[in-house]
Image (tube, grey):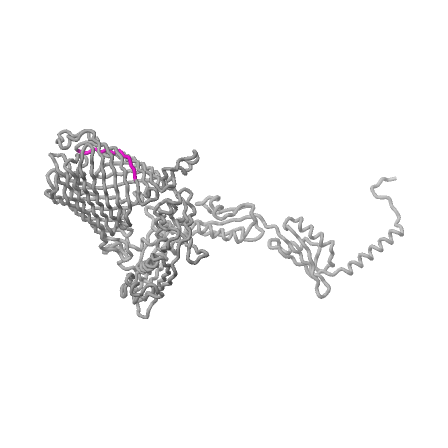
Amino acid sequence: MIATDRQPYRPITAAAVISLLLLSNAARSQSSDAPIVAEVITSGNRITPKAQIIGQLKTRPGQPFSEANAREDVQKLKESGAFADVRVRTQNTTDHKVIVIIDLAELPSLVREIVYKGAKGKSNSDLEALTGLKRGVPLNPIANQLACRSIEEKYKEDGHFYVRVTLEEGDKIGETRVVFNITEGPEVKIKHIEFVGQSDWVNSMPGFSSFGGRLRQQIVSGRAHLGIGGTFDPRKLDEDVSKLLEYYRNLGYLNARINPELVPSSDFSCVTIVFHIDEGPRFKVGHVEVKGNKQYSEEYLRKMILLRADEPFDNKIAQADVKSIQNLYGYQGERVHVQQNIIQTSDPGKVNIVYQINEMQPVRIRRINIVGNEHTRENIILRVLGLYEGQVLMWPEVENAEKRLAALQYFENSPDKGRPTIMVMDTDDPNYKDIIVTVRETTTGSFMLGLGVNSDSGLTGNIVLNERNFDITRFPRSIDDLLSGDAFRGGGQEFRIEAAPGTTLQRYTATWRDPAIFDSKWGLAVSGYFFQRIYNEYDEDRVGTRISLSRRLNRFWNLSETLRVEGVDVYNPTFGTPPSIAGYAGWSDLIGFRTGLTRDTRDSYLRPTSGSLLDLGFEQVTGAYAYPNLSADFKKFFTIWDRRDGSGKQVLSLRSNVQWTGDNTPVYDRLYAGGFQSLRGFAFRGVGPFVGPFNTGGDFAFLNTIEYQIPVLANDKFFVVAFCDNGTVESKVDLHNYRVSVGFGFRVVTPITGPVPLAFDFAFPLVQAPGDIRQIFAFYVGFGGGGGY
């Protein structure tokens, strides 16, 4: 017998045959009753193609629909890993068939790789930070296309004007790679900027070429210098056109048109920008109207309007008129809205100006809320505001208060970081408004290092530690309080320590100042100092303190009382010095009491173009020597000519100084002249009564200057000056030895030296006295830098 794996034969019983027949009949019966599948529809599949899905299904068109097959199809699609959810539903047709709808919730394809082909000037990390794309996130073709544009814009911003970025992969659903193809192109520099079609009035000054024209100062783009800067950014070109149009239209060229042209170099590494200018006519004012005024008559308002008929339209003047009308109402507590409308007329080249006035009722201030002052005490801000709860709200003072807060330099004041703002808010009472003052603290401490050299005192260093928002009462409560900068801060005071070592002059000072002591109208300043100076005749040391109490009487006038307590040491007298100098050798103590009165109407501290400064003082000194000192200093500034846009002001300045001191005045407090900012053409202390080669100093000084300053460049950073200095220093009130010198010079403002210009003067004495020391060249050069804390 042979062994086998087959099952042993078993005969089919009658029962088994009957069972098979019953199952077969049941299957035939079920198949005949099931509806036929007319169509299979997929819904929600954006990534996976329909054909790929249908190919996996048992449910197919033309076959009977089976619930069991549908369940298997759902399970199979879920196991594919492409779908988060799969559901089947049916829809009957009119011919007794069924439409099978498969609803799909796709899982998105993920980014597995990001490639930046051709990126040489930027790292992958920089580009990923720019596009925001990361591996492992769902692929989004639209976001990838936007990333292409972002890369192009960044390259163009950095000067690659001809950059092209395309998307090789990642623009189709289902892909897993994002591939950028970057053609950087050369970094394009601006070689030249030219203006074509402009009139001569836009030049820097009459007779000069357009090389330094005012148009160049209006635009943002700038050309490269020695390969530095001048990166071409096409976005700035649109801004340049807007600024030029605004410049022209503000000056009355209302129909001006600007068309920029780009002229590339042969290798496309440089570009010349040509602005084609069609100025059109300069419109004149037809007539000026005032409408909507009820409180004041039109005749009264016209008196304060500077825009005149038949004169060229100037938007700067028109805006000043709007401001004047608003201030007239606002200082009476009345709010007014003034709209300036420019209406072209049928008369060619003329426009009518209408000031439309909307008057509103006066209101009072209910509450003042201050936000953002982390260090500065609230009372410091309130006293600067000049606004008080319960007072009638003078609307112009809102803007003035914002300017005063900004001038404190305690708070951020820039377009990027914000500036002090004052909002006037409605209340539930229409007769009252709330004031919300918003500030953001900024760095008020600074540490500066500087170096200066001038013809009067040689080479001098400068080390300054300064806190503009000092609080002498805010002692540190902990080490953290001291290290964080919270201590000694927020009181609106100033504390300054300065060290200025030099070759012939050394100066060391410490000063504390409170402009409103105890929140009053009085200011207090206390300083201690040590000076050391080497003169031709002797060496001198001074150590002392000054205490000054001041009171601002109004916008222009200021009164002060100053106590000077000082010790002076005169030593190392030069061999042969006369007794009038050598007799004061040694130490002497002084106490001086000075009363000062100042009137200042200058429009600028650094470069005034109008206004005047009057400084009157009388000091009585006692101690080792008793003597009076009387002084009067007056400066007056006139703008003789300026450009149409108000820049390029040519300024005539006059100065006169008179001083007299008593007969008992020691040599170190006598009067001298000569040198920079004195009588140029003569050396420092090179004018005065002389005994042999030694200047003994005078009891009377009368010094005058006439100076004319002309800006040469359109940016008002380079000036030429012509001047005549004249005066005398005498041993008594006399004009016996009157000196006269004439000369010329230059003033240069640079970013390195800050707002104080470099000064170079050449002066030639026409009239001099015996013993005077001539010096043709005088100058001042200063450099500084530092940081805040």
Rendering quarter of residue 297: bottom left
Query: Can the viewer see residue 158 in this picture?
Result: no
Give the left or right position of residue 144, taking residue 507 as reference: right
Furthest-bottom residue in this view: 346
Residue 37, percent from left and from top: 71, 60
Q: Is residue 751 above or below residue 53?
A: above
- Where's the C terminus, which quadrant? top left
Rendering quarter of residue 465: top left
For image coordinates 33% across by 38% down, the residue present is 495
Give the left or right position of residue 507, taking residue 414 as reference: left
Query: Can the viewer see residue 358 in this picture?
Result: yes
Q: Is residue 250 magenta?
A: no
Rendering quarter of residue 49: bottom right
Part of the protein shown in magenta:
525-536
Residue 412, percent from left and from top: 39, 46
- The foreground one among 149 and 348 is 348
- The foreground one among 275 and 423 is 423
For image coordinates 35% across by 44% down, the residue present is 519
- The foreground one among 528 and 221 is 528
